[in-house]
Image: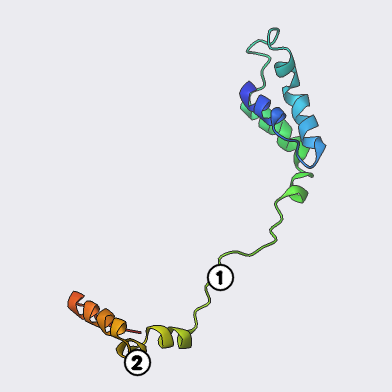
Amino acid sequence: MAAVCRYLLTRPPAPASSFSSSLRAVCGSALFRPSVASRADLPTSAGLLQRLTGQLSPWFPQQQQVRTRKRGTEYQPKNIKRKRTHGWMKRISTRGGIEVILRRMLKGRNSLTH
């Protein structure tokens, strides 16, 4: 538990300083007096979570991640482009295309082109 508190206190500060100050209030006695602190002085995980969530409940929704850029929308299929590039007429018109068709026939593909 002390390791968790130590990690949370040593990482870069959060945008709002109330989180780090509330964490110091909860974990501070165990961290700054390690020789004096006994096992009974260390906060339990349930107690720590209850104290933190009780103090941070109005603060948490405003600090959630803001998403600014959509991802995964790069591929927009165009059937005309697909047919022109990989269609039967394009394949049969070039030597490389005929080789592609023959390879697919040899492999036993049901669909030779688009």
Residue 111 horizontal side relative to residue 19, left or right: left
The residue depicted at 49 percent of the width and 79 percent of the height is: 77
Image color mode: rainbow
The answer for how far apart the CA atoms under marks 1 and 2 are is 28 Å
111 or 14, which lies in front? 111
The residue lying toward the viewer, choosing from 9 and 57, is: 9
Q: In this view, does 39 lie to the left or right of 15?
A: left
Give the residue type at disc 1.
Answer: Glu
In the rendered image, the quadrant that contains the N terminus is top right
Residue 46 sits in quarter: top right
Is residue 109 among what the camera can see? no
> Dot 1, crowdedness within 10 Å: few (<14), some or many (≥20)?
few
State the quadrant of the C terminus: bottom left
Looking at the image, tell me whether mark 1 or mark 2 is earlier in sequence order: 1
Q: Under tag 2, what secondary structure?
A: helix
Q: Name the residue under label 1.
A: 74
Could you tell me residue 31's position as x and y percent?
71, 18
Residue positioned 27% across, 85% down in the render: 98
Q: Position of residue 35 (x, y in %)?
A: 68, 7
Instruction: Look at the picture and state if 84 lies above or below 44.
Output: below
Q: How crowded is mark 2: few (under 14 residues within 10 Å), some or many (20 or more)?
A: some
Say which residue label 2 marks: 89
Displayed quadrant of residue 54: top right
Q: Position of residue 19 (x, y in %)?
A: 77, 36
Relative height, residue 90 to residue 77 (above, below): below
